[in-house]
Image: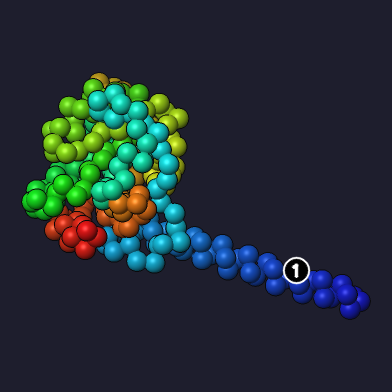
């Protein structure tokens, strides 16, 4: 092997090592983000969560992320016929808002449907009202919902339920996102976080 071929090979090896390390770092960061739910959100500033969306609110009004700027937002993706995880998470949000007292007005709780087929604005209206008077329920076309979920890195997948009257269910990730008054990501919570953890983080973000 001549000198320049050896140099080329060495350079190729160095590039391969750099790519492998970068790939590993990315996978580690992704899995860490997927598992971490302490609500501190530390160190994930480089990972972009959130972004533009176009949806329809529970009153049939076309909205975008800009409609919710100026207040903190607690955003959860779920669906109205979810048997347990969604109701528990939304109940936790409602309790946290009640614990905030007068400061609850500084936060907009938002449920974004991952079941646009069944979750009409009217269905969302009844559902969010059953949790909290200030809760907003957003839905849209399948494409609009997919775009919003992608912006928040939310996974959801329809699962057929043969023999069930529901017909299908939706598997989905259950993070609750805290977004700042400017719409930027601040923190996330697991669906099983306590109201106290959420209140603490909200108060620190006012
Ligand atoms: Ni659910």
How many neighbours does mark 1 have within 10 angstroms: few (below 14), some (14-19), or many (20 or more)? few
Between residue 1 and residue 154, name the one nearer to us.
154
- Residue under the image location 63 percent in, 69 percent down: 18
Q: Quadrant of residue 127?
A: top left
- Residue under the image location 23 percent in, 22 percent down: 122
Quadrant of the drawing holding the C terminus:
bottom left
Judged left or right of residue 164, residue 11 is right
Give the x, y percent position of residue 133: 13, 36
Under circle 1, the secondary element is helix
Q: Is residue 8 above or below residue 55?
A: below
Residue 164 visible to an observer of this rendering: no
| Total number of numbered discs in the rendering | 1
Between residue 120 and residue 73, name the one nearer to us.
73
Give the x, y percent position of residue 10: 77, 74
Give the x, y percent position of residue 67: 32, 39
Q: Quadrant of residue 60?
A: top left
Q: Residue beneath label 1, please? A: 12
Give the x, y percent position of residue 155: 40, 43
Judged left or right of residue 25, residue 56 is left
Q: Quadrant of residue 15?
A: bottom right
Q: Is residue 6 above or below residue 69?
A: below
Residue at the far front: name it.
Answer: 70
- Residue under the image location 14 percent in, 44 percent down: 94
């Amino acid at each position: 092997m001549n000198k320049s071929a050896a140099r080329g090979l060495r350079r190729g090896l160095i590039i391969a090592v750099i790519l492998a390390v970068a790939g590993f770092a990315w996978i580690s960061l992704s899995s860490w983000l997927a598992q971490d739910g302490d609500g501190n959100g530390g160190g994930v500033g480089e990972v972009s969560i959130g972004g533009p969306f176009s949806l329809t609110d529970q009153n049939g009004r076309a909205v975008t992320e800009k409609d919710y700027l100026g207040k903190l937002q607690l955003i959860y993706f779920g669906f109205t016929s979810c048997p347990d995880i969604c109701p528990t998470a939304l109940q936790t949000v409602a309790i946290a808002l009640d614990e905030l007292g007068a400061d609850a007005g500084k936060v907009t709780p938002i449920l974004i449907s991952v079941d646009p087929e069944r979750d009409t604005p009217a269905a969302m209206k009844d559902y969010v009202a059953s949790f909290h008077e200030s809760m907003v329920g957003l839905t849209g076309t399948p494409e609009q919902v997919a775009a919003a979920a992608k912006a928040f890195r939310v996974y959801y997948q329809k699962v057929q339920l043969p023999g069930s009257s529901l017909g299908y269910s939706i598997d989905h990730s259950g993070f609750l996102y805290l977004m700042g008054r400017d719409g930027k990501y601040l923190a996330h919570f697991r669906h099983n976080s306590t109201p106290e953890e959420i209140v603490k983080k909200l108060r620190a973000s006012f």
